[in-house]
Every structure is written in C-alpha cells, then in structure tokens.
Image (spheres, rainbow, N blue to C red):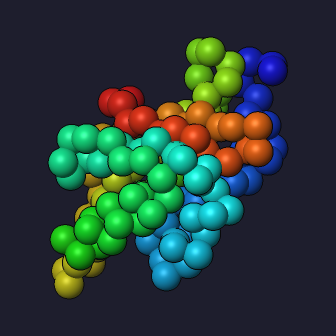
C-alpha cells in the first residue's frame, strides 16, 4: 500500500461509522462494519470486549451514562501501512448542548480480509 493512501473502501466504511455512531442507526450498522469476533476497547472499565454483541452492550452503557459524540477530523495509514488511524475529537451532548474536548485522540483500526474492523485501539494524538 502506498504510504498515506487509505484504501477507498476502508475510508468509506470508517466515515459512515462515525456518521452513524451518535444516531439510532448505530446498532443496525454494526454487522456492516465490525467483524463477528471484533476486539474493541471498553474505555469505561479499562478492559477489552470481544464480538459484536459485546460492543453493542458497551455502546448501550455509554449512551445510558450520557450521549457521547465523536467528530472525525482525519484519516491516514499508520506507520505499518496496514492499520488506519482516525484522528477524532470526543464530545458529549446533554441538556446544555454539545461540549467538545480540546484535545484529539487517535482510533487505530485493523481490518480482516472481509474489510470489516477486527480491532480498534485508542491512543493519544
């Protein structure tokens, strides 16, 4: 893969994933973006969850605690040329409106042969 060139299918999938994350479409989109045995970080508990249903349950807990927002600010290939790094700005929506973090974080995605996400990691920008 050329350095910096995110494959079009992966870029489209991740852009759509971020579009639907804070909407009611989120659960329905899971089978179209996450591998059945996806490995995902549970940031609330500091552990990892495995499988689509575990990710759905984790997201349900997040939304029960508040309304998380994530704004995609950029996509690029990681240094290994395989993983895709999404630079995102986290936020929260409540009765007073939307509040956005000053700092960005990076979501690092790995993909399987079916072009679905097999793993996601979070790291500081």
Q: In this view, does 110 lie to the left or right of 43?
A: right
Q: In this view, does 15 lie to the left or right of 56?
A: right
Marker count (numbered): 0
Measured from the top left, where is residue 7 in percent x and y?
79, 37
Q: Which residue is drawn at 81% across and 19% down?
A: 2
Residue 98 visible here? no
Measured from the top left, where is residue 37 in percent x and y?
54, 47
Residue 40 visible here? yes
Measured from the top left, where is residue 121 in percent x and y?
42, 35
Position of the N terminus, as image quadrant, is top right
Occupied quadrant, residue 111: top right
- Which of the pair 117/74 is nearer the observer? 117
Position of the C terminus, as image quadrant, is top left
Measured from the top left, where is residue 57 in percent x and y?
35, 66
Q: Which residue is drawn at 67% across and 24% down?
A: 82
User: Vertical placement of 64 versus 108: above or below?
Assistant: below
Q: Residue at x 58, y 41 (%)?
A: 118
């Amino acid at each position: 893969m050329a350095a910096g060139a995110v494959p079009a299918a992966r870029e489209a999938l991740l852009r759509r994933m971020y579009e639907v994350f804070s909407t009611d479409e989120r659960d329905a989109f899971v089978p179209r973006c996450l591998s059945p045995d996806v490995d995902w970080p549970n940031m609330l508990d500091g552990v990892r969850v495995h499988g689509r249903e575990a990710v759905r349950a984790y997201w349900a807990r997040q939304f029960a605690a508040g309304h998380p927002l994530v704004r995609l600010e950029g996509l690029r290939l990681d240094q290994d040329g395989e993983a895709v790094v999404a630079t995102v700005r986290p936020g929260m929506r409540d009765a007073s409106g939307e509040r956005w973090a000053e700092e960005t974080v990076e979501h690092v995605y790995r993909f399987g042969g079916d072009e679905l996400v097999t793993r996601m990691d979070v790291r500081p920008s």
